[in-house]
Amino acid sequence: MRAAGSPGSIRRRLLVQLALVAALLSLAFFLSLRVVAERATEATQDNILAASATAIADAVYSDAGDVRVEIPYSALSMLGTVSEDRVFYRVILDGQTLTGYDDLPVPQGRGARRAPLFETYGYRDDTFRAVVVTRALTAANQARTIQVVVAQTRLGLAAISSRITTTATAIGVAFFLAATALSALAAQNALSPLSRLAEAVARRGPKDLRPVTAETPTELAPLVGGLNSFIARLGAALTRSEDLIVEAAHRVRTPLATVRTQAEVVHLQMEKPENRAALRQMIRAVDESSRSAGQLLDHAMVTLRSDQLETEEIDPADLLRDAISRLSPTADLKDIAITLQVPGDSLRIQGDPILLQNAVRNILDNAIKYSPADTEITVRLIGGRPCRLQFCDQGRGFEAQDIERLPDRFSRGSNVDDVVGSGLGLTIVQDVARAHGGTLEIAANPQGGGACVSLVLPSY
């Protein structure tokens, strides 16, 4: 759905504008063709009328002082191209009708004395186009004036005009369709550099922040320049963010570790039970603060690094062994046993070792944190495509209504309100899984109480 105020597609706008231009040109072509064709048709009819009248005038002759006329068949047959047309004629000698229809009007107009005069008028409930041709004749040594009037209805002209209109309409529509198709091709060709530029940028990987060097038209040069400037600023910002995360991790965790060490020293020197209890609560608060701060920084690091994965071939069994080695001291404090089960066949995955270590450590840390003392955590590497890194504990497990939202940021189960946590552990794991094309699966432990969390990753 297009957002309000969005300019829409450039291709669509260009095509609509070109189609409107084509429509205007088609309309102008139609009108021009019709006007020219109708004028040519009228001129042709006038020429035929004039030829017919001239043929009749040429047939007038003097015989022993009398003026006679024999109407030639060809004079009227040339007007009979359309059977529905009616033709009338009148031959006038010195103002008196010699033959023909007495009431046929004589066209009036200005022109050369011997030139044909044309007029369109109504006669006998119809519209006629008429011509009058004037000739001089000598009879009995007297100069006589002959006028020949020929009139024809305009039915044939109307039929021809209708055919011209139909033809002009068909040509105009064909012209419009052809122009629209050519406009679409022109719009596609004109915008192809923009499409190629978009494809070149879209094909780039998340780590590719090189300047765009694709050849582009002059009109796109400002866009490419602005894009390259943005890429340069983005690269600099990502570098600063990564440096900030590393620096913040060092500056936050180191002071907290110092405070915890000092608190433990003082705790050993305290004799009063109430003071020792207060220090234990402070040490616990420092531990939780350190853990929460670490998870916040880990989440920021995962978010940043997910867009710039540095993948290599990894043995998932080594990932699990490393995580267990790091967190075993914490598990030992609660007398929690960690069992590792790996297949005999060697497995390999492609991934970012830092992100995957972070994800595995967060799953195992959660399992230790929410498991009661004197329990067992089973870590399994299940081979296949994809492979599965599974962590099953005997802790509180998950409420059914909480499972779907647990990977959300700062979301925690409804049954762990009494345990301090940030709600970022599973969020980090899910982000890492998605960055590697895998998934996070959360389910109840099928072998009793507790939970099973699985990191599913593609293998080869």
Image: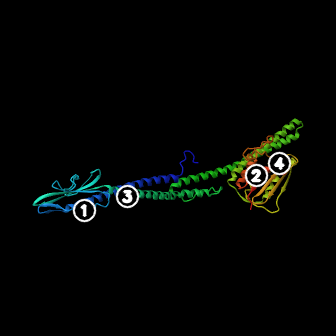
Q: Pointer 4: residues within 10 angstroms few (<14), some, or many (20+)?
A: many
Quarter of the image where one finds residue 276: top right
State the CA–CA distance, disc 3 to disc 2: 76 Å
State the CA–CA distance, disc 1 to disc 4: 115 Å
Q: Label 2 amino acid?
A: Glu
* The label number, if any, that marks residue 441 in the structure image: 2
Helix, strand or loop at mark 3? helix
Residue designated by label 1: 75
State the CA–CA distance, disc 4 to disc 3: 89 Å
Earlier residue among tags 4 and 3: 3
* The label number, if any, that marks residue 163 in the structure image: 3
Q: Who is closer to the viewer here, 176 or 79?
A: 79
Q: Nearer the viewer, mark 1 or mark 4?
A: 1
State the CA–CA distance, disc 4 to disc 2: 14 Å
Can you give x and y, in whole percent of width and height, for residue 453 in the image? 78, 51
Q: Who is closer to the viewer here, 354 or 377?
A: 377
* The label number, if any, that marks residue 450 in the structure image: 4
Helix, strand or loop at mark 1? helix
